[in-house]
Image (cartoon, helix red, strand yellow):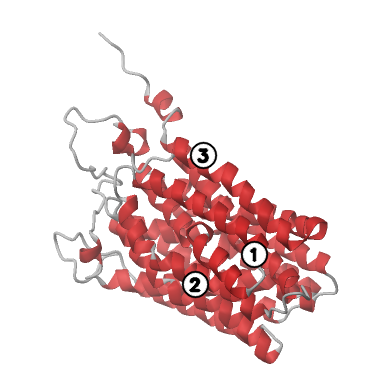
Amino acid sequence: MTAVAPPTRKKAHFYGWRIVGLGFLNNFMAVGVGTYAFAVLIKPMTEDPSLGWTRTQVVWAFTITIIVSTLTAPLVGYWLDTRHGARLFAVFMGLTGALGIALASTAQELWHLYLFIGIIAAILLHDPPFMLSATTVSKWFIRRRGMVLTISSMGISVGGLVFLPFTRVLVNSVGWRDTWLILGILVAIIVIPANALIMRSKPEDMGLRPDGDEAPPTWPSEPVSTPTAGEAEPNWTLRTAMKTGPFWILLVANNLSLAGIIGTVVNQVAYLDDELPNSSLADGAVLALVIFSLLGKLPWTVLADRTNPRFTTIAMQLLCGTGMILLVNVSTPMAFAYAVVFGLGIGGFDPLISLLWANYFGRSFLGAIRGFITATNVVSFAGAPLFASFMFDTTGDYRNAFLIFAGAFFMGAALLFMVRKPTAPEAAPELAVSS
């Protein structure tokens, strides 16, 4: 009789772990270049006497990037649900991202920056890479979804940890123009080949099942819901999900958190540079934030798979709101206190929100659902950084914007306190009454 390979051996070589690693890499590059490197480059570009740009004008490039990337998200989401969609999209993302970032080094007029960063590089620098990572990882894992989402999201924190000092060194050494060029080359040699060789949309495309489980004797043509905790995984279409109250509550809470996070992260370097005695202290505080956002992922990972992720997400938002209060009252000690509290908070955002969407609405149509959600982020994600920079240019201070972001976090926590998991679509998709 032919022996069956032990489950532990099969799972050790489960291809899904490569997808988790690739998700880490994509998050690392997207946030490292699109958020942290951009944040460091704001002041050097505005201080270039040959340009005469204001901070609001430069941040408009970031805003245009978000608008373009979020409005294309529904198409990307449907693309990710197809057999080869994830790999084709990821390669296209790397190509356009590398081109736009490298071309930014040649910008002489604002519209050049808006074209190269805001449009050409858009789908690499913001939402689509996170949606790509969260969607594919969620399709490859069910039982350990909280853990693997957290692992892939660690790329967000590590991206800041690496690219913040790396970009600062580059700017001081070669100037902002060559910095953009070097960043574009890095994207080309890292993102494109890795995704071309490794990325796959879901385990069924390779004759596998989520979590590396054995295939059943009869292999269906469509994804099969794997039971978790004695219950079949829900598989909502976008249309049926949109008929539920929890869908819209999660959507609003998601947007409120995103506004606070991205509005703060993009402007915090310039703010701390202005308020602290020197740029070294500012960089130290931001690096501390990135480190604690990375360290904070471990407890979120443990809690996510052992408790209701709704409660851990509420705790995350409360921490973020508290961090904003500390930032408003900035001093050198307060800056580092903010780094600890806000860092621990934002470390849990991406895995916890992704886990809620996957647990509430299943994995079969997750790309389409996340695509729609991402498209709605255009107001909060695009508007928040621009709003904060506008407040600075008009009042000379970021504090009022940061207080509004604090309120957004607290409001998001209140909304999540009310949300409940929707019942199965076959039963009653209209309202959610069970936790």
Q: Which residue is mark 3?
A: 194
Give the answer, above or below, for where 191 lies relative to 6.
Answer: below
Q: Which of the 4 quarters of the picture holds residue 169?
A: bottom right
Residue 38's tag is 1
Q: Which of the 4 quarters of the picture holds residue 42?
A: bottom right
Q: Residues within 10 Å of mark 3 (few under 14, many from 20)?
A: some
Quarter of the image that includes the N terminus: top left
Element type at mark 2: helix
Give left or right: position of 347 versus 227. Answer: right
Measuring 42% from the left and 33% from the top, which residue is drawn there?
15
Lower sequence index among marks 2 and 1: 1
Assess whether mark 1 and mark 2 are in contact (beta carbons under 8 angstroms): no
Name which residue type carries label 1: Phe
- Front-most of residues 265 and 79: 79
Q: Which residue is farthest right?
A: 277
Measuring 34% from the left and 51% from the top, which residue is drawn there?
80
Quarter of the image that includes the C terminus: bottom left
Task: Measure how far apart labels 2 and 3 are at the Cα level.
Answer: 28 Å
Name which residue type carries label 3: Ala
**Horizontal and vertical percent for residue 239?**
21, 65
Lower sequence index among marks 3 and 1: 1
The answer to whether residue 17 of the structure is visible from this angle is: no
Give the answer, above or below, for where 83 lies relative to 422.
Answer: above
